[in-house]
């Protein structure tokens, strides 16, 4: 239920996923749409580096926390 209002972008491919994830998150931030950004080099919420538990449960905790903070956008590197 809490995930219904989210807009998400999944980044796939062979090369450039991390850079593309950062680029899309920057565009959203510049458009006043803070987001969760998850990549192989780190996680960010609203442009701020955050630590989380690895794995699916850690991802859900990260996104649920961002949701409580009013964020409704996510950019996720999918490997």
Image (spheres, rainbow, N blue to C red):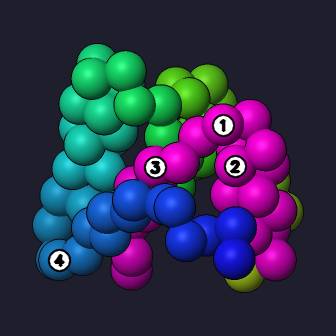
Quarter holding residue 15: bottom left
Q: Reply yes or no: does residue 64 show up in magenta.
A: yes
Q: How far, Cα to Cα, is label 4 from label 1? A: 30 Å
**Residue drawn at point x = 61 percent, y = 25 percent:** 48
Q: How far, Cα to Cα, is label 4 from label 2? A: 27 Å
What label sits on residue 73 in the rendered view?
Answer: 3
Q: Is residue 75 toward the left or the right of residue 36 in the image?
A: left
Query: Mark 3: few, some, or many residues within 10 Å (few <14, many ≥20)?
Result: many
Q: How far, Cα to Cα, is label 2 from label 1? A: 5 Å
- CB-based contact (under 8 Å), mark 2 and mark 1: yes
Image vertical order of residue 48 relative to residue 11, above or below: above
What label sits on residue 70 in the rendered view?
Answer: 1
Quarter holding residue 60: bottom right
The answer to whether one can see residue 54 in this image is: no
Reading the image, the residue beneath label 4 is: 13
What label sits on residue 67 in the rendered view?
Answer: 2
Image vertical order of residue 16 relative to residue 1, above or below: above
- CB-based contact (under 8 Å), mark 4 and mark 2: no
Of the two numbered discs 4 and 2 on the same chain, state the one appearing first in sequence: 4
């Amino acid at each position: 239920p809490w995930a219904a209002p989210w807009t998400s972008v999944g980044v796939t491919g062979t090369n450039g996923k991390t850079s593309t994830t950062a680029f899309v998150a920057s565009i959203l931030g510049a458009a006043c749409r803070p987001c969760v950004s998850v990549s192989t080099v780190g996680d960010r919420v609203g442009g701020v580096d955050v630590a989380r538990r690895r794995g699916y449960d850690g991802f859900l905790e990260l996104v649920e926390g961002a949701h409580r903070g009013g964020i409704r956008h996510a950019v996720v590197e999918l490997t």
